[in-house]
């Protein structure tokens, strides 16, 4: 047995982090996966009402894992982290520094061995209607869904080359990340879910632009094709908070691949517990 926790889209909510840290301390999983959108939305300063808290990554996120490491000692889990489309990439440097100090593995565009498993991470999502574009890519081509802003619009917290902004795709990134690896025992930590699954259903029913209905599925075509063709063992996703409520399921399956979502549109922490050796028995609790 190899017990794992997975959650995503905590959006800097202190109560969710307290629930996560308490669950880790009590249950002592071997691995913890955090699937992006970890930081407060820019206008939400509720976490900083205590004036001791001036930097969320340092004062809340790293400090919480530091306390866990001190209390758990050798039982401290392997922690895997990516950011999400609401997280400004300027914070990536702080997460990388914390990775060098052993708090976690920063996984975007990287792979790490975990026993018999290989864990891969990828943070980018297809174009959204939102202004922050640090973690957005064209999906399989330079097509943009109705209502979305292209990666060439919006703002970025750090500069990126025009060539990368205009021509990089999620499809191309995943080809480079996975290469010719055997993915039979691979775990992929994504922020975006795959297109037209139980994990990417948005609350866009009846919404139209210029009399054209919006697509209620907002996941990545590239990620769907990648899963269908390469069949990794487990894939972890977030991004679409309301999907589990609308579809009635936080999980899906494509061939042999088990897909889980850690996103949730309520105030609770959505905690997925799974055995990496037997993912079919995974559970999800709202804490």
Image (spheres, rainbow, N blue to C red):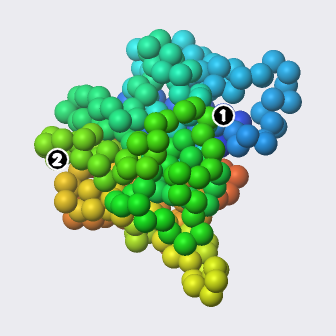
Q: Is residue 253 above or below residue 152?
A: below
Quarter of the image that includes the N terminus: top left
In the picture of the structure, the residue carrying the numbered disc 2 is 184
Q: Residues within 10 Å of mark 1 (few under 14, many from 20)?
A: some
Please tell me which residue is depicted at 29% across the width and 29% down the height of the picture: 112
In the picture of the structure, the residue carrying the numbered disc 1 is 18
Check disc 2 and report its element: helix, strand or loop.
loop
Q: Is residue 115 above or below residue 240?
A: above
Tag 1 near tag 2, CB within 8 Å = no
Foreground pick, 1 / 240? 240
Residue 92 visible (yes or no)? yes
Viewer-nearest of discs 1 and 2: 2
Instruction: List x then y, in percent, for residue 162.
Output: 46, 41
Using the numbered discs, state the Cα–Cα distance from disc 1 to disc 2 in whole angstroms.
34 Å
Foreground pick, 174 / 62? 174
- On screen, residue 219 versus residue 150, left or right, reads left
Q: Is residue 102 above or below residue 218?
A: above
Outermost residue, front direction? 162
């Amino acid at each position: 047995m190899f017990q794992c926790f997975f959650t995503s889209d905590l959006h800097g909510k202190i109560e969710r982090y307290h629930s996560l840290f308490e669950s880790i301390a009590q249950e002592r999983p071997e691995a913890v996966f955090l699937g992006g959108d970890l930081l407060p939305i820019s206008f939400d300063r509720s976490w900083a009402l205590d004036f001791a808290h001036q930097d969320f990554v340092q004062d809340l996120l790293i400090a919480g894992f530091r306390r866990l490491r001190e209390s758990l000692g050798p039982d401290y889990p392997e922690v895997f982290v990516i950011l999400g489309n609401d997280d400004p990439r300027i914070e990536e440097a702080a997460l990388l520094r914390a990775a060098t100090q052993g708090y976690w593995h920063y996984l975007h565009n990287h792979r790490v061995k975990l026993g018999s498993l290989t864990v891969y991470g990828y943070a980018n999502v297809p174009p959204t209607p939102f202004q922050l574009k640090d973690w957005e890519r064209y999906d399989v081509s330079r097509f943009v869904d109705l209502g979305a802003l292209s990666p060439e619009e919006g703002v970025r917290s750090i500069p990126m080359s025009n060539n990368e902004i205009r021509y990089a795709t999620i499809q191309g990134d995943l080809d480079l990340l996975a290469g010719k690896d055997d993915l039979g025992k691979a775990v992929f930590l994504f922020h975006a879910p795959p297109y037209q699954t139980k994990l990417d259903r948005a609350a866009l029913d009846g919404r139209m632009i210029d009399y054209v209905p919006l697509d209620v599925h907002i996941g990545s075509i590239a990620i769907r094709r990648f899963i269908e063709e390469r069949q990794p063992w487990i894939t972890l996703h977030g991004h679409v908070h309301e999907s589990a409520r609308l579809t009635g399921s936080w999980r899906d399956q494509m061939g042999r691949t088990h897909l889980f979502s850690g996103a949730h549109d309520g105030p609770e922490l959505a905690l997925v517990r799974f055995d990496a050796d037997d993912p079919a028995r995974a559970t999800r609790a709202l804490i």
